[in-house]
Amino acid sequence: MRDSNTKSRRTRRAVATPLWARINGHVRLEAHPDGRIFACFDHHLVDLGPFGANAAHLARELSADLPLKSIATGEGTGDQEIQSLVGRLARHGLLEYYLGGQTGDDVVVEPQVADYQPRMPPLHDADFLVLSRFAYLRRRADQLLLESPLAGAVFGIRNPKIAALLALLSTPKQLKGLRRQDGFPGVELLALLLDSRILFKIAAGCKGDLRRAEGDDGLVLWDFHDLLFHTRSTEGRHANGQGGLYPYVGTIAPLAPVRSRWPGKKVDLTRYRSADSQEGGQAAELLRARHSTRNFDDRRPITLVELARFLDGAARVQSKWTGQLELGDCTAKLEYAARPYPSGGASYELELYLAVDKCEGLARGFYHYDAGAHALVPIVVEPNELDAMLASASFAMDTAATAQVLITIAGRFGRVSWKYSSLAYSLVLKNVGALTQTLYLMATDLGLGGCAIGSIDIELFAKMTGLEFHTEGAVGQFAMGRAAMQSSVQR
């Protein structure tokens, strides 16, 4: 598609605009007679909506690449519809930007979050810049990718001189000096990287702790690998495929559900079982009865009384105590608040947020569960955000049904990372597992249905709460309600 526009692109590059936009190489735009534009890729068809009589012109414009200035102003399009088309393509991850250079497309900017827009904050020769400690380079096919879990885009680096210059920024450098370096890519790229938090500014002569200079206290507490794991194993801050995509079908056979036996003489434990099949008491009975419920009976929604009992048994603060830490010359007062499930280091960093669709006695809305006061506190959110969160959970469960109550488990990460190094995020996820099992058992005991959800949009949760994703972020979800009579289950 882009090869056919080579001549046009060469002509357009004569315009003094450093940043250009284009649709991804595997995407084709089709304008239908009714004015609707469709994006076609990988046997998929995405309806981008109606665009009026000039729809075909808009599709041709973007297929031939547009300078960013014309997108921002509507210049050359006759109206502002190009902005709407670009926005819709970006929300579907079908748009990219690039900086041209003597070697061609030196840098390709691939948006990773739905509302990413490239910005170039002003830079001056006296400014000092340094790489974020979260930034890293890796290989993808035949190019280098510059990434950071803090960034809303990844940068494909196709000019090795740019990669060499970025290595210089492992220590603070003044822009004036960088300009004199061989292969200096231009201020535009540095401004884009600054906007994406891959670079950050420091004060002249700053010799302090760069870790503290980079961000707020919440960011200081994160190790590189933990924050990367958090952002790449959830939705919202990357454009990679995720979920049950079966990427190795036809390449590697699936592993057996039960591991093959080790050699040696086995000790048969079945001979020690009691004749009573329910041996183990109530706990074993609940464990055997536990299953995932994906369909809920909207004619009989969960009641507020049942929800209160559920939260009381699974997550309410049971006791509090304090301790004293003495480490070298430092002392600190430690406070703890135990809950019904186990938590590494008694951190109890997990918070519950409830997206309520149907609950008898409780208004539809978004709530925080105050585990200390055993109370629900409403949080004002946009109706479309609440709808989006509930719809995303239904999609993850592969059902058209909506959870009556959707619980988002959020982590106050600093409760764990203040104490633990290297394994902080791992501990958070272990605690999520322990809490999830507790939610399952409590729902089973009350005759309710529940289903753990493996994917979650951390950006949507951040917008709904106003919390930074690295300070208190979503780490799990649990859908619940009254099970439909013929609910499909998966243990």
Image (tube, grey):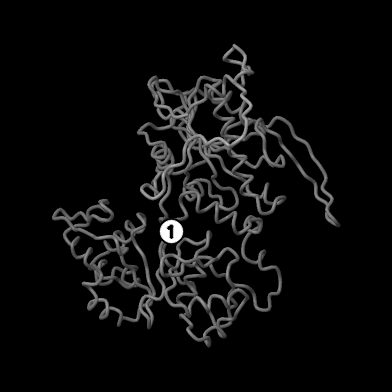
Q: Residue at x 38, y 71 (%)?
A: 98
Tell me where residue 349 sits by quadrant. top right
Residue 196 percent coordinates (x, y) = 50, 65
Number of marks present in the image shown: 1
Amino acid beneath label 1? Gln
Whole-percent x, y for residue 329 in the image: 86, 57
**Foreground: 471 or 169?**
169
Q: Which quadrant of the view contains residue 78?
A: bottom left
Q: Quarter of the image for the N terminus: give it.
A: bottom left
Residue 51 in the figure: left or right of residue 285: left
Residue at image location 49% in from the left, 73% down from the top: 191
> Is the residue 179 above or below the residue 357 in the image?
below
* Residue drawn at x 40%, y 32% as measured from the top left: 402
Give the SS element for disc 1.
loop
Q: Which residue is outermost to the bottom? A: 180
How far across and how far down the image is residue 263, in percent?
A: 59, 36
Q: Nearer the viewer, residue 444 or 383?
A: 444
Residues packed near mark 1 inside 10 Å, few (<14), some (14 to 19) or many (20 plus): many
Residue at the extreme right of the image, as rendered = 329
Residue 82 horizontal/vertical position (percent):
28, 63
- Between 60 and 123, the one lying in front of the other is 60
Q: Which residue is mark 1?
A: 112
Residue located 41% across and 66% down the image: 141
- As displayed, is residue 209 above or below residue 221? below
As drawn, which residue projects farthest toward the left?
33
Seen as rendered, the residue at the extreme front is: 264
